[in-house]
Image (spheres, grey):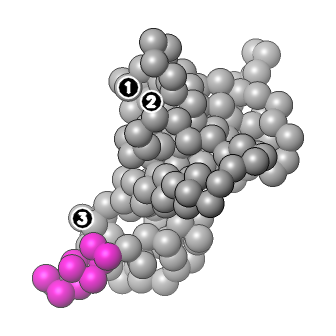
Amino acid sequence: MDGQVVFLPGELFQLAEREGIVIEWWDFKPPLEAVYWAVSGMPPVIGLANSLESASKAYFRCVVAEELGHHFTTIGHCVPRIYYHYHDRTEISRAEYRALRWAAKWLMPLDGLATAFRHGIIGIEELAEYFEVTEDMVKFRLNLPDILEFQLAG
């Protein structure tokens, strides 16, 4: 982005840098907002849509975290194609779920949730504000299996 200072969540940016991931801004056509791409012999790349520049901090954090989730959970690259078989579609869905699960757990770790709950922060909107994530991310996170284990242990 020519000379513009763009907010990139510090911790997520630092994680990407430690992992050798290049973050680039591109003119994606909607609805595409971000992509993770990794091929052997080259540094992995997260491409972010220029349109994300005007997104809320919470939404932006969730998008970047999910793309980082692909780095940590997806073996090989998994890019949707116009023509593909059912097996490809299900594998893409699994890869998206794994990446989103990683993002949700990273953005809202169990110990952070425990702290929030102890302080009476229990509503979806309150949790979204507390963790600087979207309400959809909070809902997804609260439905992950480790929450049940956490509730049973607490």
Q: Check residue 111 in the rendering and tell me which mark sits there, or answer none.
A: 3
In front of the other: 120 or 139:
139
Q: Is residue 141 left or right of residue 92?
A: left
| Residue 34 x %, y % | 67, 41
Q: Quadrant of the C terminus?
A: bottom left
Kind of residue indicated by mark 3? Asp
Q: Check residue 121 in the rendering and tell me which mark sits there, or answer none.
A: none
| Residue 46 x %, y % | 58, 31
Q: Is residue 95 left or right of residue 54?
A: left
In whole angstroms, how far apart are the C-alphas of marks 1 and 2?
A: 5 Å
In whole angstroms, how far apart are the C-alphas of marks 3 and 2?
A: 23 Å
Label 1, on which residue? 19
Magenta stretch: helix, strand or loop mostly: helix
* Residue closest to the far right: 29
Kind of residue indicated by mark 1? Glu
Label 2, on which residue? 16
Q: Is residue 123 left or right of residue 152?
A: right
Q: Magenta residues?
A: 145-153
Kind of residue indicated by mark 2? Ala
Is 83 located above or below residue 136 in the figure? above
Magenta residue check for 146: yes
Is 146 located above or below residue 154 in the figure? above
In front of the other: 37 or 77:
77
* Residue closest to the far left: 153
